[in-house]
Image (spheres, rainbow, N blue to C red):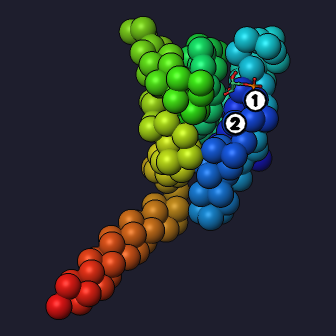
Amino acid sequence: MPQVSVIMGSRSDLDAMKEACQVLEKFGLDFEARVMSAHRTPEAVAQYVEGLEDRGVKAVICGAGGAAHLAGVVASHTILPVIGVPMKSTLNGLDSLLATVQMPRGIPVATTAIGGSGAYNAALLAVQMVSLSDPELREAFRKFRQEQTHKVEKAAEVEAQEWA
Ligand code: RP5
């Protein structure tokens, strides 16, 4: 049973969105990834998203570019938390960012940075959400953060030695 759903507006989003899938895999979360579009397959989006809560999904990640309505439309069909990832586009992702982040009052979308880094962070946020009711996952996330800090500290040490 998936804990997280990853939806992208086009196959062309996969290069960036696979960063989200890799993070979810690393933390051992069950997830499913789907390509469906707010504009090209609106009915499929509604039908799929309306079934997610009953299937045990806890968070939804949506990547889309251009006039990126996917995350907002998904959020309108569920009360699950939705994380939007703006994809790079002909306008360098600024259009996607504004379309995703500027949700009108009442239907929130938690929006991350543009592209692969945003997809990576979206998955981390999803892990944090799921970990609220999963102490083991919470500890794994805590360890990840400590290791990340340690890596940066180590890199800083190397730089200092190089200046000597
Ligand atoms: C959006 O349009 C997709 O999310 C994608 O980022 C963008 C371009 O899609 P394709 O024309 O490459 O299918 O709906």
Judged from the image, the secondary structure of the residue bearing numbered disc 2 is helix
Badge 1: residue crowd in 10 Å (few <14, some 14–19, many ≥20):
some
Q: Quadrant of residue 46?
A: top right
Work out whether 148 lies above or below 70.
Answer: below
Instruction: Give the x, y percent position of residue 90.
Output: 59, 24
Q: Regarding ligand 1, which quadrant of the image does it lie in?
A: top right
Does the closest atom of ligand 1 sit within 8 Å of the Cβ of label 2? yes
* Residue 51 visible in the snapshot: no
Instruction: Give the x, y percent position of residue 40.
Output: 79, 13
- In this view, the residue in front, 48 or 160, is 160
Disc 1 target residue: 10
Q: Is residue 14 left or right of residue 138?
A: right
Work out whether 164 lies above or below 85.
Answer: below
Amino acid at dot 2: Asp
Instruction: Give the x, y percent position of residue 24.
Output: 62, 55
Does the closest atom of ligand 1 sit within 8 Å of the Cβ of label 1? yes
Disc 2 target residue: 13
**Which residue is at a point 78% across and 35% down the rendered structure image?**
11
Which of the image's four quarters has the C terminus?
bottom left
Work out whether 107 lies above or below 149.
Answer: above
- In this view, the residue in front, 54 or 124, is 124
Judged from the image, the secondary structure of the residue bearing numbered disc 1 is loop
Numbered badge on residue 107: none
The answer to whether mark 2 and mark 1 are in CB contact below 8 A is yes
Amino acid at dot 1: Ser
Instruction: Give the x, y percent position of residue 99.
Output: 50, 16
